[in-house]
Image (cartoon, rainbow, N blue to C red):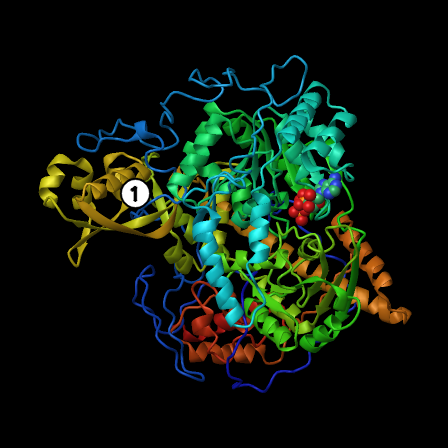
Amino acid sequence: MDADSDSDGSHISATPPRDPLPPPRLPPQPPPKPPTSYKSTASTKRSSHLDIIFKLKKPSSSKHDKIEPVPEPEPKVKPIQQPDLPSPVGNFPFQIRRPSDQPHPISIGRSLETLPAGFFSTRRASFSKICKPSLNFEPETLPEITAEPKINGSDGPGSTKTCNKKLPNLIRGDVPLPPVKLQKRSEEGNFVRLNFNGYKRKFTAKGKKMNSYSYKSKYFKRSKRRVKSEVDTGSLCDEEGLVSEIKLQSKAEKPSRCESVEAAISAVRNEVSDENLVRLLKALYGYDLFRDGQLEAIKMILAGKSTMLVLPTGAGKSLCYQIPAVVLPGITLVVSPLVALMIDQLKQLPRMIQGGLLSSSQGPEEAAETLRMVQEGSIKVLFVSPERFLNADFLSIFSTLTSVSLVVVDEAHCVSEWSHNFRPSYMRLRASLLRAKLNVECILAMTATATTTTLQSIMSALEISSTNLIQKSQVRDNLRLSVSLSSNRMKDMLKLMKSSPFLGAQSIIVYCKFQSETDVISRYLCDNNISAKSYHSGMLARDRSRIQELFCANKIRVVVATVAFGMGIDKRDVGAVIHYSLPESLEEYVQEIGRGGRDGRLSYCHLFFDDVTYYKLRSLMHSDGVDEFAVNKFLCQVFADDTSSHRKVCSLVKESASRKFDMKEEVMLTLLTHLELGETQYLHLLPQLNVTCTLNFHKTSPMLLADKDTAVAAILKKSEIKQGQYVFDIPTVANSIGVAPGDLSNHLQNLKAKGEITYELKDPAYCYKIVKVPSDFCSLTELLTRWLLDIENCKVWKLDAMYSSAVFVVDTCEKTHDCNVAQQTTCLQERILDYFKGDNNLDVLDKMGQNSPFLRADIKVFLQSNSNVKFTPRAIARIMHGIGSPAYPSSTWSRTHFWGRYIQIDFKAVMNAAKAELMNFVGKDAP
Ligand SMILES: Nc1ncnc2c1ncn2[C@@H]1O[C@H](COP(=O)(O)OP(=O)(O)OP(=O)(O)O)[C@@H](O)[C@H]1O
């Protein structure tokens, strides 16, 4: 989590001051069981905290979905005007409603994930005559590609492949394999086309002619400018490191090496023996031996078995898919959670393996070029995001034209909601779906950090047999671990860095929790003669990759970073990793210390922890939580649209919906994905779009154009005219003429190219089609709410386990009066192993207070002073814990002096107190 939740509220209270001391540490409690399945809990009774929303005193006359400007709150205890709040569902007491019959005002735009216009030229509809309802322009039902397939069946000149059929990914003697076709890297290296910082870079061989985007021209000049500005500000960078790295990447492969790789691949295809595989390892990478687990994994994949691979960070998991990728006949798809990670992995591919990537940040031409190469069969490893699986055009290539031999799910823990890093889009990666859409049998799931519960859920989703699990210890032996409780972390960290062994470390990563901390600490280190730079996701991508490059080239000694500097960083000689803040989970801790010692040499990892950070993080663990009534309202809106036509595209504008339901966008996506991929399929998600279009006509008059063009006629019908501009919702217009929103966007582009119109698209939205309207909204609401609650509890438990482990190590050390690094390493390693084994014997401290004598009184004053605002118990608890939410943003609410005041009291206890006070308030107020 990359947020800064510092409160700067005043300290005036209507009640006596709170106890400045944290509640005493309680004896270890039996560990709360991490949830095993939401299904089991779903049928239980509704949660005890009734999800009530209260309207205080004056009823609001504003419509609930109308967003009004946020008035500045008066200082002290004057009421704060709340701009856009979830409105009550039914009358008090709370009722769960079915969706209303009212039509939902949809809006829409341009696909963020659609393929470039013109890629499938035959798909274009002519809008001049069209749009009979019988025409089906829906992306997933269209005959996707009508052009002659070129790959595997090309009869064109120069074609080297003749096989039309999909090849199985199982290596057997009776299966005809295509000839080994390695890319001789004299032209481009393994970079297909990368979009670095918005510039295309094409790496060419030394001595060859550069293209117009070669690093020597644009990129080099830019990097020089950047270097200058950094030197001006006192940083220590020069361009040499970066350029030499690029030069290294652009070196051509010698033909003899290519031949030896080709021979080694052929040998493995003939016989998958240890000897042949070692020969291939040597030829491709120059390594003599496989590391623990690698050979086993490669053999399993080459035997066509789906495999779960759990190896520590830096143990060499990538090689386990790269070798099969060159041996297997078809393409290998690698699903990665982050674009930055894809770029890093693409860079790290051996030169002989042609790779490519598809990401939403690419331009249409770049994506088209990559897809063309995929179809030609010249890409062996393609990196994609899980969101790409929403794109029907992308899927069609694999279901009809290109054979996929292997799907690799990297960072596979993201599949599981019980992991530290659940990604809703990873829910799409189910074996059944992959098989249906890609016709692939073999799946490799890889992670360094998974508890037994997480592993079970990954293996069940990807249908990996328990016999195909390869698991090695999750922490490498060359990491020396130490921990200390610190009340002055800055000072202590400086002391640590100025003493042995940290003093001798060539490269150091310092991990912080909050973005603001990274800047403060890097400045502090620089002031103390330690060269440091900060790195976090709030920085420009260009600046981030620059810092990463300089760090890898040893031009910066210390990077002070948030969690954003993690996965994919493969600098081999990081000598120390310091945690300035407590990580959110042991998984995150293991992932981050895994950046150290990747060359196998000793690396020192020190963790500072303190109670203040723990309390802040614990509050943040509740920032994704939602209440039952909000889930119900959300469902009502999702299914509010006219359900008679299942062909219609519905949309939910992210920003306004997020405020309306007081739900983070990520949570809404989680719910929508569950509605698509849960036990019953209620909807079908489509790529996200910008849905609101503002259009101007230029050449022909709108009426005349409408006579010739059905789409324009529909636009005129469905638009509102605002300041002379036509404002309309893309899906509404597309639905009215029976075409897909993407095709309407393409048509608008054509009109723009002819000079007829100009237009702008805004309002990113989730788009979907309704498959089935739920028959029982109440049960579905309850099921989803319980599921989200379990995820919230699981996150809290993970943080508690992390904190308890740090306390445990320090306490054990103190008791034995013999604290040294070796002892702390063993102690923490054991703790980590127990945690990952999930034997539930881990003692987890419950440090949170359960009550405070002033809590109820403060809530009462807070309510009185904001009597014109609607609150839920959760909203009040968030304010008392100092966490903002879409409807109660910190920019507004951190001005109240109650902000973050009860951070040491358990969130649920604050919610309960808030509920009781709200009941009192409404009770008193009732006529
Ligand atoms: N058999 C081997 N012998 C020597 N070095 C190896 C071997 N296998 C992999 N490596 C090297 O180890 C380093 C780490 O490999 P890789 O990036 O694949 O690790 P990883 O397990 O994917 O780590 P992470 O989980 O952090 O991404 C790379 O530089 C790689 O070249």
Quadrant for residue 687, please give it: top left
Q: Residue at x 46, y 76 (%)?
A: 863
Identify the element where label 1 is drawn.
helix
Nearer to me, 210 or 351:
210
Q: Residue 695 location in percent, x, y?
A: 21, 50
Coordinates of residue 223 in the picture (x, y in percent): 49, 58
Report the front residue among 408 and 132.
Answer: 408
- Residue 100 lies left or right of residue 230; in this view the side is left
* Quadrant housing residue 367: top left
* Residue type at tag 1: Pro
The residue closer to the viewer here, 649 or 36, is 649
Q: Please tell me in which quarter of the rendered image ligand 1 is found.
A: top right
Total label count?
Answer: 1
Residue under label 1: 731
The quadrant of the image that shows the C terminus is: bottom left
Q: Is residue 419 above or below residue 642?
A: below
Direction from residue 565 to residue 607 in the image, left or right: right
In the picture, measured across the screen, residue 576 lies left or right of residue 66, that is right
